Image: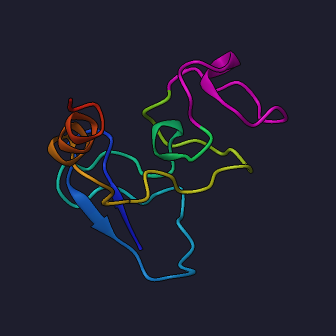
Amino acid sequence: MSVICFNCQNEIHFSDGENISRQESCPSCYASIHSCKMCKFFDTASYNECREPMANRVTDKEKANFCDYFKIGGLQDKGPSKADLLSAADSLFKK
């Protein structure tokens, strides 16, 4: 499994099923991994920037926290690139 660091955008690799401790940090920039910005529930459009309704409010989204609902997010999904999407749209709407 790999994730993208919210701070430096470098890829971080983990073993499948590996537990992520509160002290884990990015090997490149040392940003906290057990933080809101690395959680799959982090959403700036949601109340308290979290889609998990039972989670306590965390004010500093970039620092390590004790949230029990933390699930590593930012899973790398190499879907179609922007150029591929634009090309597909052009071909779809071409006269």
Main SS of the magenta segment?
Answer: loop
* Residue 7 to residue 40: above or below: above
- Where is residue 28, by image quadrant? bottom left
Q: Which residue shows up at 20% across the image and 34% down it? A: 90
Q: Nearer the viewer, residue 22 or 95?
A: 95
Horizontal and vertical percent for residue 37? Answer: 46, 37
- Where is residue 50, by image quadrant? top right
Which region of the structure is painted magenta? 42-60
Q: Nearer the viewer, residue 87 or 31?
A: 87
Horizontal and vertical percent for residue 58? Answer: 63, 26
* Residue 34 to residue 24: above or below: above
Q: Is residue 27 left or right of residue 44?
A: left
Residue 59 magenta-highlighted: yes
**Furthest residue in direction right, as rendered:** 54
- Where is residue 6, by image quadrant? top left
Q: How is the image coloured?
A: rainbow
Horizontal and vertical percent for residue 83? Answer: 14, 43
Q: Which residue shows up at 44% across the image and 82% down it? A: 15
| Quadrant for the C terminus in the image | top left
Q: Is residue 11 left or right of residue 68?
A: left
| Quadrant for the N terminus in the image | bottom left
Q: Is residue 79 left or right of residue 63?
A: left
Q: Is residue 18 left or right of residue 87?
A: right
Task: Count every numbered label the image shows and give the total.
Answer: 0
**Furthest residue in direction front, as rendered:** 95
Q: Which residue shows up at 60% across the image and 23% down it? A: 49
* Residue 93 to residue 69: above or below: above
Q: Nearer the viewer, residue 16 or 88?
A: 88
Residue 49 magenta-highlighted: yes
